[in-house]
Image: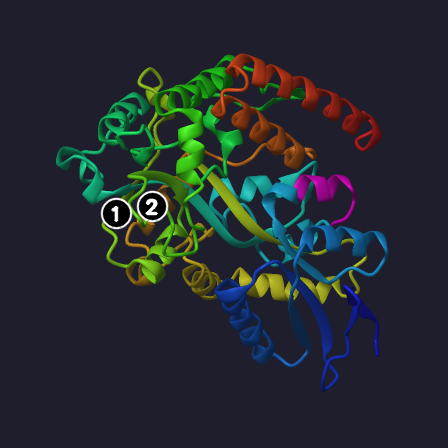
Amino acid sequence: MIGASVMGDKAVSRQGGAGRTTVIYWEKWTGDEATEMRKVVDAFNKSQDKIYVRYLSISGVDTKTMLATAGGNPPDIAGIWLDQLCEFSDAKALTDLSPMAKAAGLGPDTYIKGYWDPLNYRGGLWALPSTPASIALHVRTDLVPKEYGSPETFPKTIEALDEMAMKISKKRENGDLEMAGFLPSNPGWWNFAWGIYFGASLFDGDKLTLDSPENVRAFKWVDKYAKTFGSKEVQSFQSGFGTFASPQDPFMQGKVATELNGVWKASYIHVYKPDTQWFAVPFPYPADRKDLAGHSELSQDVLTIPRGAKHPQEAFEFIKFVQRQDVMEGLCKGHGKNSPLEKVSEEFFKTHRNKFIRLFDSLARSPKAFSPPQIGILPQLQNEMNVAFQEVNTQQKSPDQALHDAQNRVSDLWTTYKDQVLNK
């Protein structure tokens, strides 16, 4: 056996066939997403006879990749999340792809700016995209007033959204929530981003700004929903939700009329409740901040080459293959996502399962689109914002107090991180 990558208690052979160099690729995806990437791997393996990519679905791929890298025997390719990129880079766990990308003609002109920029950090290019996403407000056409039942007529401001949501929400006689027009806690995946929709930032230069006036304003907005519907009532209401990948999803079940979610939502609607009447619009902006119109959070799954990979050049050949327009569009369509590439074919838009795919593409290209801040403690920062959100949403703390406490906790962590990791 020529080397091995360790997966749990199993050793995966690097031995390829017919003299090929075997590249070990660890990816987090399972189910249909894994199947779509496996199609790409198979196509690459059939396209040439020098390299063979061995594709493995790995649970906890981030932790296992970091451990394998520290142990000197990482996979050649690791599929991780953009949120982890700075942490991995600061830990010197990744290979800088800049020279190989430049030689391959892959650069800022190849990609939508909002997807390219976050891949560059502290002078290096640490990943290239596999599949990206943009986020928008999904609306149940049959649950909102007729005058708001189209993308053109739907409320443009947060205040108008709130007014509509309060009017159409339904409570039972005992006070329990039956249907919510909107809930900031559903699905609750991007709690760090609410302030950004109000014009906030979490990181300014070298300073954390979790308790900025804009973040406080956003959390007061969250607080208003909790007080209006009742924190216990909302918790009880949400406890009956099924998972987003099931027919019991609250949006598909008509338990919520509007929901902030990603481009991939359409794929789950298509599979589990294709008769759902819906459309998507950019998330509304504060009435006094029209300059924030078109805001959308961007996310990415990315391909990296861990430091110490046995075959970095061969690994990059596969990553380069994924960046081909036909390959990328096929993978992104299979995952129900938009493309990260600057050039997108008309065929991609016409045959995509998401009927609003052009909206998600335009949101990704918006100058107001944003990604999570580039900071090595991002996972911990996001966790602290989740804690603060829950404290407000359950009426344990005021918005000012919750964010003040989160700011203090993260600031202490950031000071230690800069000292011990960044040597600042």
The image quadrant where one finds the N terminus is bottom right
Residue under pointer 2: 251
Q: Residue at x 77, y 63 (%)?
A: 8
Distance in Å between CA atoms under marks 1 and 2: 10 Å
First reached walking from the N terminus: tag 1 or tag 2: 2
Query: In the rendered structure, are the residues bearing label 1 and label 2 in contact, judged by CB atoms less than 8 Å apart?
Result: yes
Q: Mark 2: which amino acid?
A: Phe
Q: Residues within 10 Å of mark 1 (few under 14, many from 20)?
A: many
Q: Nearer the viewer, residue 122 or 280?
A: 280
In the picture as drawn, the residue positioned furthest to the left comes out as 146
The image quadrant where one finds the C terminus is top right
Q: Residue at x 41, y 52 (%)?
A: 264
Span highlighted in magenta in the image = 85-94
Point out which mark residue 206 bears: none
* Relative to 79, 88 lies left or right: right
Disc 2 on helix, strand or loop?
A: loop
Residue under pointer 1: 278
Q: Nearer the viewer, residue 361 or 177?
A: 177
In the picture as drawn, the residue positioned furthest to the bottom comes out as 18
Specify whether residue 253 is painted magenta. no
Task: Point out the frontmost of discs 1 and 2.
Answer: 2
